[in-house]
Amino acid sequence: MRPFSSLLLAALVATSAAAAAARPNIIVIMGDDLGYGDVSCYQSADLKTPHIDKLASEGLRFTNGYCSASTCTPTRYSLLTGTYAFRRPGTGIAAPNNPAIIRPGTVTLPGLLKQAGYHTAVIGKWHLGLGGSKGPAWNADLKPGPLEIGFDHCFLLPTTNDRVPQVYVQDHRVLNLDPADPLWVGKKKPSPDHPTGITHRKSLKM
């Protein structure tokens, strides 16, 4: 298995399961479109990032870490599995109804951390698909997902913030799901009762 990258999705947090004093906490932060020159601890002259700088000064700083891909899903896949995404079909940018790309049984970074005695959690943008081969069952348990590949807890935005469904997922369920108003994601013609950018072009003008 190839060495893991030094980034993560919106925030992978691993805390010690046993003695915190004997085992350091691990926080890996992945920021979309964040470049080497966008944080001041790496000599950014224009942007000041004091909190990240403090983490860098008190922790381990990578000076030779490289992104395995230029887009969301394959970068996250490579980070969590240690495998180049281009070597596995289906790791391009995940659609909103994409099944879970990392399957249970895959060796993953959070799985290895659990074996080492850590409690693990992922918080923020996921964009690696959820559910079985038919995709996520938004109104039921979302399995498999992060909890099936090594995380103890998750609080997620399932895809990007410009795609449906605009919901949060906590562990296996959509947060604040209303059974009377079930979620549906797919291809349908827009309701005539709701204006769209195509039918109401003038509404888009500022």
Image: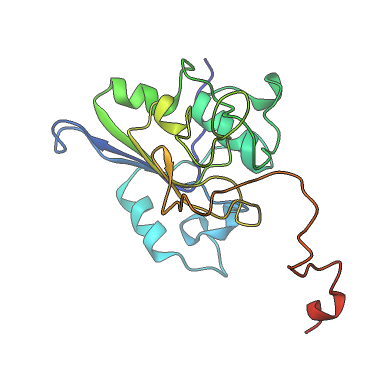
Number of numbered labels in the structure image:
0
Colour scheme used in the picture?
A: rainbow
> Which residue is located at x 49 percent, y 53 percent?
180
In this view, the residue in front, 47 or 180, is 180
Q: Is residue 188 left or right of residue 169?
A: right
Q: Which residue is found at the position 59% from the left and 51% from the top?
A: 165
Q: Position of residue 24 (x, y in %)?
A: 24, 37
Residue at the (20%, 33%) spot, across then down: 23
Image x and y of residue 138, in percent? 53, 41
**Quarter-of-image position of residue 2:** top right
Quarter residue 102 falls in: top right
Residue 131 shown left or right of residue 194 in the figure: left
Q: What residue is at 85 percent from the left and 80 percent from the top?
A: 202
Comparing 39 with 10, the one in front is 10
Kindly give the residue lying farthest to the bottom in the view shown: 206
Residue 135, placed above or below residue 62: above
Left of 166 or right of it: where is 107?
left
Residue 162 in the image, given as x and y percentages of width and height: 65, 57
Rendered-image quadrant of the C terminus: bottom right
Residue 198 image point, x, y percent: 86, 66
- Is 56 located above or below residue 22 in the figure? below
